[in-house]
Amino acid sequence: MAAAMGLVLLLVAGCSTIGNAATGGRTVTFAEEPSTPPNYILPLVGASDYINANVSDFSELLYPPLYWFGNRGVPELNPRLSLANPPLFSDGNQTVTVTLKHWVWSDGQPVTARDVIFWMNLVSAVTDSNAPTVPTPSGQPGPSWAAAVPGGFPVNIASYAATGTYTVVFHLNAAYNPRWYLYNELSQITPLPQQAWDKLTSAGGAGNFDMSALARTTISGTTPTQYVPADPGTATSGALGVAAFLNAQSEQTSTYATNPLWRVVDGPLRLEAYTTNGYAKFVPNHAYSGPNKPAIAAFVELPFTSDQAEFAALRSGSLTIGYLPYQDIRQKSYLTQKEGYTYSPWYVMGIDQFYYNYTDPGAGPLLRQLYFRQALQSLVNQPQFIKQFTAGTGTIDNGPVPTYPPRSPDLSPLEAGKQLYPYDPSRAVSLLRGHGWHVVPGGETTCTRPGPSSSECGAGVLLGQAATLSVIYLIGSTIEANEVAAMQSAMKAGAGVTLTVKAESYGSIGGVIYGCTPSTPCNNWQLANYTLQDTWVYFPDYLPTGGELFGCGAGSNAGDYCSAVNDANIAATHTAASNSSETQALYRYEDYLAVQLPYLEVPNVPYQLTVYKSYLQGVVPQGIYGELYPQNYRIQ
């Protein structure tokens, strides 16, 4: 190991100039996904920015959630890393009592129930349907919450209160299954430093501004004041005003390392340096209250513009933790034998997908036809993708519940069985012809029998309309480029379906796909993904019941899939009276969507093929939800 501790600027071929911290001493470097720099630091984040680069790899290192999930690679609650003791349910599962442990913020102040109330007030304000529009400096949507689901958290909380310095009581609007409520609702809470962040302007001091836009009532039999979400009033005051201020500060990425707001943390690390291209240097938070105090001097995340640029850094041995691009899998022995790396595929609890844009005025009516989605899926050769593009490491995506971990009790027998929609061009052609299409393999397929009947193209599909879709995907990712090229070729040759493709940055794609709603449709995409390996990881809703992803009007429902049957199936998973009935409800939900194909399925593959310097301990097991554990790293 080299002894140098300074930062060296390297210009890697095919990559922008990056800060490369020396791997010697006690500094650990970590490769970011290509063209996916962290660019949002506030834990209260909207759907377009809610990705691993901003959450698991960034804000959670500074601001861990109230309850931590992921326990040595197992998808379960981790009590040791949680800021609170396991919740107590009472009153027929309609009352939840949460008691915080005695953690402290880096400014020396304790993490208290008031910090939980602060989060609750902000998230209640930004998810309030009566909230006014909040202007932002960048012109992007104002503060929002990616996990918001109509009727879900925090709307399903009738009231909440701090009943002591470290105790919060939630009164729910109905009886909910305790496991589901912990894993998918309480899991959304992140205590925030109220004493430092409860502000409306940078110049002003902190106060209790988050309280002013909430209705106050008293619940019989209790002495504390109960705060109930209400109309937040104007965009410049109250809880919504505080959220708007924090959102505006989070958009100013160039100030991340200097803004006093972000210096108050309770996670294992604090941010010491940051550049707008994504370079981020973290150092230990010496006030960290959790177990396993950080032993390294620094944790540095490095940006790359492509897989090739990242692999060049691996070949030079300058990265402590990186990933082996799938197309370079044959180089594994070189890295392990010549550069001292250990190879460990990183599997997460997620699904891989291309979103459909159901709001598109032209293609939307076509995409809403089940037969058409079935035809498209029959033109995706998942086994070939696994063999050729993912070094044989993937598994068939067969529905909305992840196929990893294997033999998961959450995976229904239907999903765990044979592939529901195997590659079958003849079936695709038959489906299209049976519904009124003139199919020209290798040419242009068009609708010749418009209409809503079972033998016609479907409601809203026009006479002569071509089977043409536009696709946007993440720039810099070879695996995604390969998948898109293969789909483009197979769909054209097999059934005359034309894909027009374009690679863009994740920030650009996220802004586009989450800018569409049924009331404000958009026609600038029909298929899209915007993360490496297309993976949706199940957090902060850790049970894969899919509400925030497939529920009508949900915050992370890109493309706006909507089904009343699906919503009812999801709701049934929330209120099951027992674990067995919860399992049956989950199976019913996933089996319905497995058949309905709300998205285009591509293989579930490892989050990445991790390689790390063999002298670094504590990297494995890797986070089942994509989470990082720099506090566990030890250099031997």
Image (spheres, helix red, strand yellow):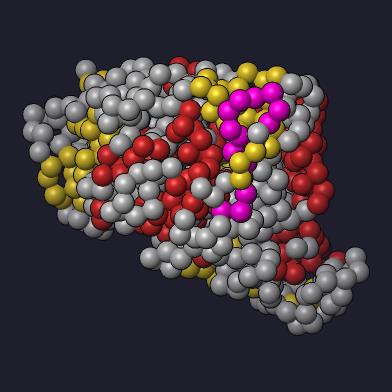
Asked if residue 553 is among those painted magenta in the image, a careful observer would answer: no
**Nearest to the observer: residue 502 or residue 573:** 573
| Direction from residue 105 to residue 189 in the image, left or right | right
Residue found at x 64% / y 64%: 517
| Region of the chain picked out in magenta, as a range | 219-232
| Direction from residue 323 to residue 578 in the image, left or right | right
Report which quarter residue 163 is drawn in.
top right
Residue 308 position, x and y percent, is 31, 52
**Nearest to the observer: residue 534 or residue 563:** 563
Residue found at x 15% / y 36%: 22
Report which quarter residue 218 is drawn in.
top right
Asked if residue 222 is among those painted magenta in the image, a careful observer would answer: yes
Specify whether residue 310 is in view: no
Residue 630 position, x and y percent, is 32, 28
Quadrant where the image shows the N terminus? top left
Quadrant where the image shows the C terminus? top left
Residue 8 position, x and y percent, is 12, 45
Establish if 467 lies above or below 527.
below
Give the mark count. 0
Residue 454 position, x and y percent, is 90, 65
| Direction from residue 453 to residue 180 in the image, left or right | left
Considering the whole magenta stretch, tell me its main secondary structure: loop
Establish if 44 lies above or below 393.
below
Residue sticking out furthest to the bottom: 464
| Direction from residue 443 to residue 267 in the image, left or right | left
Residue found at x 79% / y 74%: 460
Specify whether residue 241 is in view: yes
Residue found at x 61% / y 34%: 226
**Nearest to the observer: residue 141 or residue 489:** 141
